[in-house]
Amino acid sequence: MTDKKRNIKSRIKLLPQAIKDELDRLIREDRMTQADILREVNALCEQHGENPVSRSGLSRYSQQMDEMGRKIRELREVSKVWVARLGEAPTSDTGKLLLESVRTLAVDVVLEMQKEGAKVEPKALNQLALVMQRVEQAALSSHKREKEIRQAFAEEAANKAEEALANQGMTAGTIDTIKKEILGIA
């Protein structure tokens, strides 16, 4: 395969957005055969004065969509397993796992764009940047919440220790030192 051949955009990627959206919907719904989808899409192409989509082009595109869907389903399954395993503990690593998964998906999208040799559209870059910004904001928020939870836990433990030690007759100075150790102030 020559370099020139590899740099040719797929016919489907050249379709107007309205036709491509309809094609994506038909594939996602999974209610029609590829032959029926091809007839439907080519009828839309004809209405809009576009060249028809080939059977092999539709098949390749459908396989790409299936692969992307498979990866998303796998990610969801992995997330379900980890959420079930880690439980609903507020300081669990579930959020970190999900954030890392989104980062990985974003990298996969960029690599796929580069692999296809497609020109990266500014809109796509903007959306990817927004996703990454939101992921990072979520990570910072999660880190802040985890820190607050740990602090509250340490304060609760220090107060219980203070109470227990006072009942055992320890001096206020010793209790204060132990409390500071628990709180990480010492």
Image (cartoon, rainbow, N blue to C red):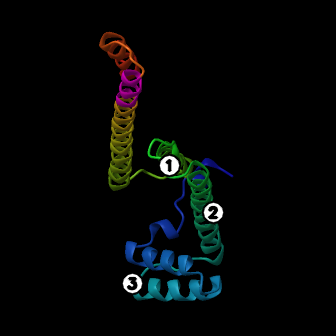
Give the labeled residue for mark 1. 98
Region of the chain picked out in magenta, as a range: 158-167
Give the labeled residue for mark 3. 48
Residue 84 is situated, as x and y percent measured from the top left of the image, at 59, 55
- Callout 1, which amino acid? Leu
Which of discs 2 and 3 lies nearer the camera? The answer is: 2
In the image, 87: left or right of 123?
right
Alpha carbon separation for disc pair 3 and 1: 41 Å
Going from N to C along the chain, the mark reached first, 2 or 1, is: 2
> Which residue is at a point 39% across and 35% down the rendered structure image?
153
Going from N to C along the chain, the mark reached first, 2 or 3, is: 3
Going from N to C along the chain, the mark reached first, 3 or 1, is: 3
> Which residue is at a point 57% across and 88% down the rendered structure image?
39
Tag 1 secondary structure: helix
Alpha carbon separation for disc pair 2 and 3: 32 Å
Which of discs 2 and 1 lies nearer the camera? The answer is: 1
Q: Is residue 35 magenta?
A: no
Residue toward you, 37 or 32: 32
Count of numbered marks: 3
Q: Residues within 10 Å of mark 2 (few under 14, many from 20)?
A: few
Compared to residue 91, the image places residue 2 above or below, namely below
In the image, 98: left or right of 55?
left
Q: Is residue 162 magenta?
A: yes
Residue 23 is situated, as x and y percent measured from the top left of the image, at 50, 78
Tag 3 secondary structure: loop
> Which residue is at a point 40% across and 30% down the rendered structure image?
157
Q: Residues within 10 Å of mark 3 (few under 14, many from 20)?
A: few
> Which residue is at a point 36% across and 24% down the rendered structure image?
162
Give the labeled residue for mark 2. 70
- Callout 3, which amino acid? His
